[in-house]
């Protein structure tokens, strides 16, 4: 029997479902404020990605995590939802969902999805993380990493608690997947209305990834958020994220 996807839900009384997929190493609280802002009008579903704190399933691959989320959508929401948003690893899983099932949602927001594999980074993950994995449970190290990620201050306790719960094996697995993922040709069949979003201060490969996704997704829009680093759009500007998502769906 398959282990169910762990989800947090807001606004369950509403018929239209919005699903938001958090970034790697984070958890559902990545989108907590967005959920609180949207739940008056929408049923907001926040899955916990495989291999992360609170999930009972180990991370196998982006493809497998996407398949499991599609299975959940089929069983719980009739096979499709109104919208799906994703950040980083969650955005890669969203890209894969759209490739596996082009009709899974009507609207999508792909934020900072890396789709250009990096062989060097991929090869270094195992030895680098194996030698430093013990540090992640140390608060001083977590604070240093948290500062590097430029996340808003009120998320530190969530970040420290849940990052420390991720096993070394799962961390290595999803980091390797993150650095080796490439979009499938089937993505071109997607007919959802898609916004591809990337921070203007992100690395060049991330900007290249955004342009590639924009080219592959017919009718998509590409938005470069000037002045923002990786993940800052949804994490540090949740009110703007929620407002722009609503504007997209109501246009």
Image (cartoon, rainbow, N blue to C red):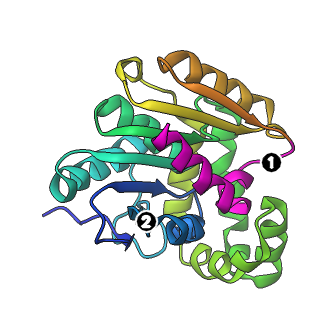
Question: Residue 46 magenta-drawn?
Answer: no
Q: Please tell me which residue lies in front, 63 or 120.
A: 63
- Check disc 2 and report its element: helix, strand or loop: loop
Q: Is residue 13 visible?
A: yes
Question: Residue 240 magenta-drawn?
Answer: yes
Residue depicted at x 40% and y 46%: 83
> In the picture, which quadrant includes the N terminus?
bottom left
Residue 191 coordinates in the image, percent (x, y): 37, 24
Residue lying farthest to the left in this orientation: 1
For label 1, the residue is 229
202 up-or-down from 21: above or below: above
Residue depicted at x 76% and y 75%: 142
Q: Please tell me which residue lies in front, 51 or 202.
A: 202
Would residue 204 be found to the left or right of residue 62 on screen?
A: right
The disc placed on residue 48 is 2
Rounded to the nearest angstrom, the CA distance separating label 1 from label 2 is 23 Å
133 up-or-down from 125: above or below: below
The residues colored magenta run 227-251
Residue 28 coordinates in the image, percent (x, y): 50, 68
């Amino acid at each position: 029997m398959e282990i169910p996807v762990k989800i947090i839900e807001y606004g369950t009384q509403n018929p239209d479902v919005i699903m938001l997929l958090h970034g790697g190493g984070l958890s559902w609280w990545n989108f907590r404020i967005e959920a609180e802002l949207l739940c008056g009008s929408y049923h907001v579903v926040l899955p916990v990605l495989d291999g992360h704190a609170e999930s009972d399933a180990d991370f196998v691959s982006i493809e497998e995590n996407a398949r499991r989320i599609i299975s959940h959508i089929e069983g719980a929401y009739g096979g499709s939802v109104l919208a799906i948003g994703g950040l980083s690893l969650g955005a890669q899983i969203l890209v894969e969902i759209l490739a596996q099932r082009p009709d899974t949602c009507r609207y999508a927001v792909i934020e900072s999805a890396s789709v250009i594999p990096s062989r060097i980074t991929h090869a270094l993950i195992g030895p680098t993380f194996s030698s430093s994995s013990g540090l992640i449970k140390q608060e001083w190290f977590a604070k240093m990493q948290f500062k590097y990620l430029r996340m808003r201050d009120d998320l530190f306790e969530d970040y420290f608690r849940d990052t420390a719960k991720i096993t070394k094996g799962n961390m290595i697995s999803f980091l390797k997947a993150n650095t080796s993922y490439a979009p499938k040709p089937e993505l071109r069949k997607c007919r959802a209305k898609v916004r591809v979003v990337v921070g203007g201060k992100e690395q060049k490969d991330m900007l290249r990834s955004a342009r590639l996704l924009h080219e592959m997704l017919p009718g998509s829009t590409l938005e470069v958020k000037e002045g923002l680093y990786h993940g800052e759009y949804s994490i540090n500007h949740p009110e703007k994220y929620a407002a722009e998502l609503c504007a997209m769906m109501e246009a």
